[in-house]
Amino acid sequence: MSDATHSAPQKPAARSLHQLDTRTKRRNASETRFKVMGIAAISVGLAFLVLLLTTIILNGASAFQQTFINVPVYLDPAKIDKKGNRDPADLKKATTFTYAPLIQKGLLEVVEKAGLETDLSKAKELKNLISASAAAQVRDQVLADPALIGQTVDFKILASSRVDGYLKGRVHRDEIAKDKNINVAQLDLTDALLKAGVVHKGFNWNFIFGSDASDSRAEQAGLGVSMLGSFYMMLVVLVLALPIGVAASIYLEEFAAKNRFTDLIEVNISNLAAVPSIVFGILGLAVFISSPICRNPPHWSVVWC
């Protein structure tokens, strides 16, 4: 029997916990790259968000300012109150077509008194500088105070959308060759009136509290009715949808039996949550518009259609 030399198992060399092995280094490097890519993605997203907000503010800030024209208007009794009795019923017969020439004449007198050089010598040629809502503004003030008839009253009226767009940089001279609503001579007069202080910009409260407007008087458009409609919609949702939705969810989760019918309801609820509400709104609008009732609506279907 020979003596066999058995070597004792070698212990692994002692290594400090602070010394990183190759695998740990790779993991740390991957984690570092992931952090860098995450920070880069967030930075790019924030940059685009800042760009979007800056664009919205720069393009939309001008909507809070509106161009106005100070015009002294002589409220000619021969035109407004032909009978001379100041009867509100008779005053209402004078339409905006009666007041528009008075405003145009007043603006022409301002131009002449200021000694501004222009090729526009007739009052009608100044029509495109004035908002289509100006006549209604003057008429409403006269109806509210008939004592103004026969006097020269200073009115702060809205300028037309073309004049407002020109002063805000949206309407350019080289783009109005075929524009029927403004011409170069009227823009030249606008610049002269601006220097004379007759035309000026002011805060547009009507943009916040006003209602929608037609294309002929776009300068009068506002958000008031839209905000009011959104407020009433929120009330309807709060009063109807919220309690019904909470009650339905509690019933389905706690009391309803698990069967095909409840499964169908839950699937449809999930579909409603997944699809944007505007899609269902467009579908509902299409149904209402194409329905026979709305094509030939009886008197009782006014609210429905």
Image: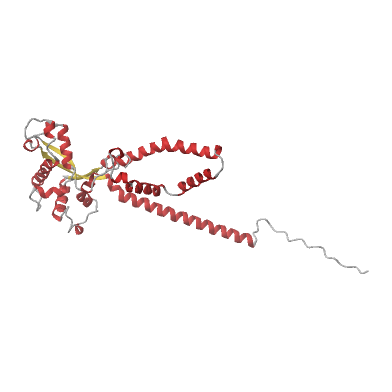
Q: Nearer the viewer, residue 13 or 260?
A: 260
Q: Is residue 161 left or right of residue 244?
A: left
- State the quadrant of the N terminus: bottom right
Q: Nearer the viewer, residue 207 or 88?
A: 88
Q: Nearer the viewer, residue 76 or 265?
A: 265
Q: Is residue 48 left or right of residue 164?
A: right
Residue 216 image offset from top left, x and y in percent: 20, 48
Q: Is residue 83 left or right of residue 265?
A: left
Residue 112 image offset from top left, x and y in percent: 8, 46
Q: Number of marks in the image?
A: 0
Q: Quadrant of residue 80?
A: top left
- State the quadrant of the C terminus: top left
Look at the image and name its color scheme.
secondary structure
Residue 23 image offset from top left, x and y in percent: 63, 61
Residue 253 image offset from top left, x and y in percent: 54, 40
Q: In this rendering, is residue 37 above or below 200?
A: below
Q: Which residue is at 15% across, 41% downward?
A: 135
Q: Nearer the viewer, residue 144 or 113?
A: 144
Q: Quadrant of residue 72?
A: top left
Q: Quadrant of residue 22?
A: bottom right
Q: Residue furthest right?
A: 1
